[in-house]
Image: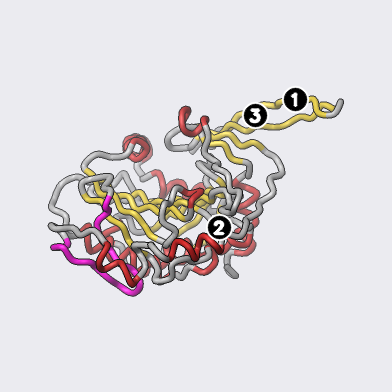
């Protein structure tokens, strides 16, 4: 497996002195998409937004006192009911993105700090998604599970929730993963993610292990502090509770690490292997977003929106080493 990168050096005249800045252009080992790592000191500061937490409680549709009345219902798979497990509640997305488009209320609390999420929050949510997938008629579907947390991550509702898309048509990037993984399997006789673990497990981007799951810093990050989770069990709907626990506890560890860095907003996604074939393995990705506060800023700008190229300020080897040293205590 090739971990390819190229180096450019920029010279900038500042205050009569020439400074040199190193830019790394890295190629994703599977898709060959590029990422630019601009190495610079970047202060991470989160602000106080307690006023917004309180003000949004008065109308939040996901709070327990409103969700039964306000949640949209699935008239087919769920027979117009809400599915509940622990604090998790599954219902239809009022603004559907696919044939089967769902929302999962994750916690009873309207706001949860990133370091306060519990493994059980995610396990209960994932089991509800499994139950739903198993009821979908036969056919090829692309299943993704994602989370936007707080405004920098694109969330319009503060209350912690997950979104599920089950579509007959893949997203653009999922399609790229699908055909790239098929090519890799045909050339190497093993799925890409299994080989990635073999190549990275002793290396400088390896982070740690939870139940049946390996965690690795992405070589070509798609966002800040990009970490990948690679499970042993391939299809999401068939995963054991032990496997779901491994994914969920890894998420919690990473979120605690984000909290320790003053990061409070994030995106994650699971690309699920269900109904796709042996070449594909369910894989998890999480990235931090710019911290939410009174003066938060967006970290997605024209290179990502119009060139589909990520720009990040932190090298995966550095943050992998930092989180690996703390993995067991997180």
Residue 23, percent from left and from top: 65, 32
Image quarter for residue 87? bottom left
**In the drawing, what numbered circle is on residue 7?**
3
Confirm whether residue 185 shows in the render. Answer: no
Q: CA distance from mark 3 to mark 1?
A: 13 Å
Task: Please name the residue that numbered disc 1 is placed on.
Answer: 11
**In the drawing, what numbered circle is on residue 306?**
none
In terms of depth relative to the viewer, which is nearer, 33 or 30? 33
Task: Please name the residue that numbered disc 2 is placed on.
Answer: 264
Q: Based on the picture, tell me whether residue 86 belongs to the magenta stretch.
A: yes
Residue 170, percent from left and from top: 28, 40
Q: Are marks 2 and 1 in contact (CB under 8 Å)?
A: no
Q: Secondary structure at mark 1?
A: strand
Confirm whether residue 261 shows in the render. Answer: yes
The residue at the point 62 percent across, 47 percent down is 317
Q: Is residue 199 left or right of residue 74?
A: right
Residue 276, percent from left and from top: 25, 45
Q: Are marks 2 and 3 in contact (CB under 8 Å)?
A: no
Q: Closer to the N terminus: mark 2 or mark 3? A: 3
User: Label 1: few (<14), some or many (≥20) within 10 Å?
Assistant: few
Point out the frontmost of discs 2 and 1. 2
In terms of depth relative to the viewer, which is nearer, 254 or 100? 100
The residue at the point 62 percent across, 44 percent down is 315
Span highlighted in magenta in the image: 78-94
Q: Closer to the N terminus: mark 2 or mark 1? A: 1
User: Label 2: few (<14), some or many (≥20) within 10 Å?
Assistant: many
Residue 59, percent from left and from top: 38, 62
């Amino acid at each position: 497996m090739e971990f390819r990168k190229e180096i450019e050096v920029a010279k900038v005249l500042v205050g009569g002195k020439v400074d040199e800045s190193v830019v790394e252009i890295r190629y994703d080992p599977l898709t060959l998409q590029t990422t630019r790592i601009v190495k610079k000191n970047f202060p991470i500061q989160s602000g106080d937004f307690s006023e917004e937490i309180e003000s949004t409680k008065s109308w939040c549709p996901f709070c327990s006192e409103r969700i039964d009345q306000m949640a949209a219902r699935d008239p087919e798979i769920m027979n117009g009911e809400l599915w509940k497990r622990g604090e998790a509640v599954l219902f239809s997305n009022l603004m559907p993105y696919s044939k089967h488009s769902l929302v999962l209320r994750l916690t009873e609390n309207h706001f949860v700090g990133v370091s306060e999420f519990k493994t059980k929050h995610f396990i209960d949510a994932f089991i509800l998604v499994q139950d739903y997938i198993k009821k979908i008629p036969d056919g090829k579907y692309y299943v993704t599970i994602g989370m936007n947390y707080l405004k920098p991550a694109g969330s319009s509702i503060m209350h912690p929730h997950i979104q599920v898309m089950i579509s007959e048509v893949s997203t653009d990037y999922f399609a790229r993963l699908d055909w790239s993984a098929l090519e890799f399997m045909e050339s190497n006789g093993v799925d890409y993610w299994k080989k990635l673990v073999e190549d990275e497990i002793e290396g400088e981007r390896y982070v740690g292990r939870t139940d049946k799951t390996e965690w690795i810093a992405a070589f070509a990050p798609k966002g800040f502090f990009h970490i990948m989770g690679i499970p042993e069990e391939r299809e999401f709907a068939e995963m054991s509770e032990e496997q779901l626990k491994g994914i969920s506890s890894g998420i919690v560890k990473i979120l605690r690490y984000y909290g320790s860095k003053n990061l409070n907003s994030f995106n994650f996604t699971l690309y699920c292997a269900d109904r796709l074939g042996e070449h594909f393995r369910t894989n998890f990705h999480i990235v931090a977003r710019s911290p939410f506060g009174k003066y938060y800023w967006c970290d997605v700008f024209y290179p990502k929106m119009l060139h589909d190229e990520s720009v990040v300020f932190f090298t995966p080897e550095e943050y992998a080493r930092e989180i690996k040293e703390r993995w067991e205590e997180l």
